[in-house]
Amino acid sequence: MGAAMSAEMIDQLNERFGISGMAAVVAARGGLAAVRITSPLASAEIYLQGAQVTSWQATGTAEVIFMSEQSRWEPGKAIRGGIPICFPWFGPKADDSKAPQHGFARTAEWQLETIAARGAEVVVTLALESSAATRELWPHEFRAVYRVTVGSELKLELSVTNSGQTPFSFEEALHTYHAVSDVRQVRITGLDGLRYLDKPDGYQEKSQQGEVAFTTLTDRVYLDALEDATIDDGSRQIVVHKENSHNTVVWNPWIEGASSLADMGYEEWREFVCVEACNCRDAAITLAPGAEHTMTVAIRVG
């Protein structure tokens, strides 16, 4: 599901959708098509491959999104960092160990539908629909629409519609890599008292006591996590607000996990923490024919 877009096609998209002085469709890293936004409120970059946000920086603040310097920029290859969209499954596919990790949405080419100015904000809308390629991996008819609003906060809306004749269930996550100064100094609040599944400990169910701190590989699915989570990075706080998301995933691979990732630098594990809006496992979404589900995330810097 990955093929390089020609420079001519990218130019045509820019002619159709670009907004002078605010948004342009460009050939970005690896020649991949991306929407580059520079508005009075913020700058951002969104790749059409995976509809992946790879940068968001509110004016007067530091970059919020982490990207690995070792990331691949190739058609059909996952981009390490940014905000990958996990859909229609999270992690490995339950019934097919050979299927791509986290689904096919993050490596598929999404269709650019609109770029619109809303005052000083810029709203980018992208879409992905079922095709012969997706049906080989997941035999359902769907339409996914992703709206990214770039402003003094970053708003992400993932809507999935069942366009077929039978119900289906899916998992989803917005796998956000938040840039931090040093994960060993980071604390996360807003999850105190919640139950979580501890993946490194065989998905044992545990209870969060106080703040989340990082001293080793951390990979947790927090259950019934409906409130804001705040990443305290010392000099700044990143607040993650979400709606229609029942899980919050917190992940950092630490040194041992990062060393097994070919597209991550040896020391880069220190520079990010993933705090992800998610509906997975028992919180998977079931849609009747014609039904729609929208998960929303808003990220702001405090």
Image: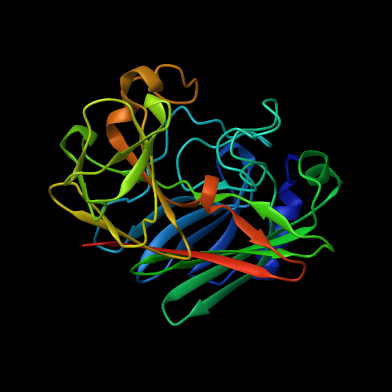
Q: 148 or 22: nearer the eye?
A: 148
The reply to whether residue 52 is visible in this rendering is yes
Task: Name the spot of residue 241 as percent of width and height, x first.
Answer: 35, 63
* Quadrant that contains the N terminus: top right
Residue 118, relative to residue 206: is it above or below? below
Residue 114 in which image quadrant: bottom right
Q: How many marks overall?
A: 0
Q: Residue at x 75, y 52 (%)?
A: 8
9 left or right, relative to 61: right
- Residue 116, position in %: x, y? 56, 75
**Is residue 280 in view from this perspective?**
no
Q: Position of residue 235 (x, y in %)?
A: 13, 50
Of the 4 image quadrants, the one containing the C terminus is: bottom left
Picture residue at 32% right of the left edge, 25% below the top: 254
Look at 47% across and 22% down and name the residue there.
261
Residue extending furthest toward the bottom: 119
- For residue 47, side relative to residue 165 (left or right): left
Relative image position of residue 272 (x, y in whole percent): 32, 38
Residue 101 versus residue 211 in the image, above or below: above
The residue depicted at 19 percent of the width and 44 percent of the height is 209
